Amino acid sequence: MTLKTIRLELARNPDFPEGSAAHGYDLKAPLDAAGHLDADAWRTQRAECRVRRFWAGEGDRNGELIHTRQGWAFSYEPGDADDEAIYKLDRHLFRTGEYVTITEPDGDYHTFRIASVK
């Protein structure tokens, strides 16, 4: 299974009425033919399933795509204190224009638009 590079950009919200291409994530993950996350391929390619969080005014954070008892998340350091949960990631269709919700460790959540899948 070939890994895809998925770019997520902050969707419109009260702070960013037009959304923001300067806030988001670049994710490498395996997708099946329909565009859903391929969990079986993730198990065999887990070390290559990486994420880069970019946020204007902050340094980039590099981490990995993980699966926990609570579901899918981005993790940047060992332990779960910094994990960012991804709402129903296994059900998402990764296609340009679709949306994904990510919850920060403090409980705040943001919606991101899928800007590209390559």
Image: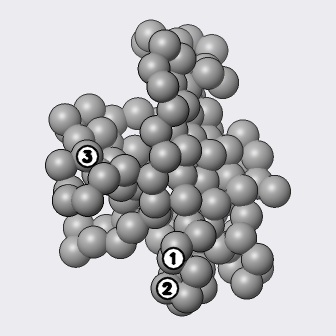
| Up/down of 35 relative to 73, above or below | below
Tell me: 60 left or right of 69. Answer: right
Tell me: 13 left or right of 99. Answer: left
Task: Find numbered disc 3 in the image and state the secondary structure of the residue it sits on.
Answer: loop
In the rendering, which numbered label is found on residue 46? 1
Kindly indicate the quadrant of the structure image that contains residue 40: bottom right
Q: Label 1 to label 3, Cα distance in Å? A: 19 Å
Q: Label 2 to label 3, Cα distance in Å? A: 22 Å
Q: Quick one: quadrant of the N terminus?
A: bottom right
Q: Residue at x 32, y 43 (%)?
A: 103
| Up/down of 50 relative to 102, above or below | below
Q: Position of residue 69 (x, y in %)?
A: 22, 74
* Residue identifier under label 3: 82
Q: Is residue 67 visible?
A: yes
Task: Find numbered disc 1 in the image and state the secondary structure of the residue it sits on.
Answer: helix
Please tell me how crowded label 2 is: few (under 14), some (14-19), or many (20+) other residues with Cα within 10 Å.
Answer: few
Q: Nearer the viewer, residue 65 or 61?
A: 61
Q: Are marks 1 and 3 in contact (CB under 8 Å)?
A: no
* Residue identifier under label 2: 43
Amino acid at pointer 2: Arg
Q: Are marks 1 and 2 in contact (CB under 8 Å)?
A: yes
